[in-house]
Image (cartoon, grey):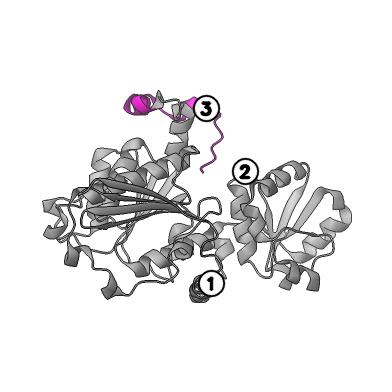
Amino acid sequence: MTNVNITNFNIINKLEYQRYSRQIILPQIGMEGQIKLKHAKILCVGSGALGSAALIYLSSVGIGTLGIVDYDLVEISNLHRQIIHQEKYINKYKTYSAKKTLQRNNSNTNIDIYKKKLNYNNVLQIIYKYDVIIDGSDNFDTKYMLNDACLFMNKTLIYGAIFQFQGQIGVFNYRGGQNYRSVYPIKPLDYEVPSCSDAGVISVIPGIIGIMQASEAIKIILGLKEILNKKILNIDIMSFNIQLISINHNINLNNKNFFQNYSNFSKKLQKNTNNLSKIYKVPTIKNTTLERIIKLIPNNILVVDVRTPSEYIITRIKASILIPLQKFYNNNTLEWLKSYRKNRAIVVYCKSNNRSVKAIQIMRSSNIYAIQLKDGISS
């Protein structure tokens, strides 16, 4: 997930090597893997029951930067399951409490805190800098909004949920895989699923699920193959029943509820997407400059249109080729771009900016760097 150019093993200092030596000797990690972990950025939405366990273990393994989103205060009823908090932090913000605990456990970890409620106005600005997003939320509004934002920004989401003696975990939007809304297209009403405060929860189940969320995040950062992708894992510690359910990737993609609800989300985000290029710090080129380059050195530039075929037929830049955005989730497309880009600059465009930014982000994850045509074909 995180691409690191390993040129100097001194990136890991002596104390860090001693600290992480027992995992560095694992063939799946090694020095290169430890450097990947150090450069990784992981966001945890919620520092409650799930977030507590996930954050502690992510910090202990050597994740370089952890982000925490939470606006709640620590209450005494939290302490039996939210192990990152202590009695002395009751009535303090959970972000403050969590940061103190993590810094005390591992001073090498950078902690970003967002003492605010996640909403349509801030979700893109918060999640954009992170490699992996962990869902430690306890309500469906946040879960669906977070899923849609991750889908919109091409971020991998590690989902978790708990209920009494049961827990559930899944990895969504991993390399173009299934997402939460396509599995559960209809959001339940609040009264249909009771919360922990209403139904209760045993303290160990969020610990189990939270640790598993951390484990999946670590595996993704390391680039390991055995990811809980296109699967949902259910655990019941009362009966010790464990189910691994495979998800048919196409099972709900044609469900009208998915597209209608995701479309509604996209409309709510629309007012915040005009600055997407600035959020992602995507390099841009003006149309007039591109035209001059095409005339002067046509063989040294590759212009890619990421719109749909129907849009491409109506109007396009004459020298461009069509690669619809959806095809960027295919490794064959990325491999072709890698081989074709030699001695060529890649310029990407769409109708405005949004799809081209997504395409550039996907390419970046494979070390393919591109420039965006400012304001798209409408410019």
Horizontally, residue 167 falls left or right of residue 130, namely: left
Residue type at mark 1 is Phe
Q: Is residue 193 above or below residue 201?
A: below
Give the x, y percent position of residue 30: 45, 26
Q: Is residue 55 above or below residue 62?
A: below
In the image, 239 versus 138, the foreground residue is: 239
Judged from the image, the secondary structure of the residue bearing numbered disc 2 is loop
In the image, 170 versus 274, the foreground residue is: 170
Residue type at mark 2 is Asn
Q: What is the spatial separation of the Cα atoms under label 3 and label 2, in whole angstroms?
A: 19 Å
Horizontally, residue 201 falls left or right of residue 304, namely: left
Judged from the image, the secondary structure of the residue bearing numbered disc 1 is helix
In the image, 140 versus 348, the foreground residue is: 140
Give the x, y percent position of residue 280: 55, 58
Any part of residue 124 in sight: no
Residue 5: in magenta span: yes
Disc 2 crowd, CA 10 A, few/some/many (<14, 14-19, 20+)? few
Point out the tag, 1 or 2, that comes first from the N-terminus: 1
Q: Say which quarter of the image contains residue 57.
A: top left
Horizontally, residue 188 falls left or right of residue 249, namely: left
For label 1, the residue is 259
Q: What is the spatial separation of the Cα atoms under label 1 and label 2, in whole angstroms?
A: 31 Å
For label 2, the residue is 367
In the image, 252 versus 66, the foreground residue is: 252
Residue type at mark 3 is Asn
For label 3, the residue is 8
Q: Give the range drawn in magenta.
A: 1-23
CB under 8 Å between discs 3 and 1: no
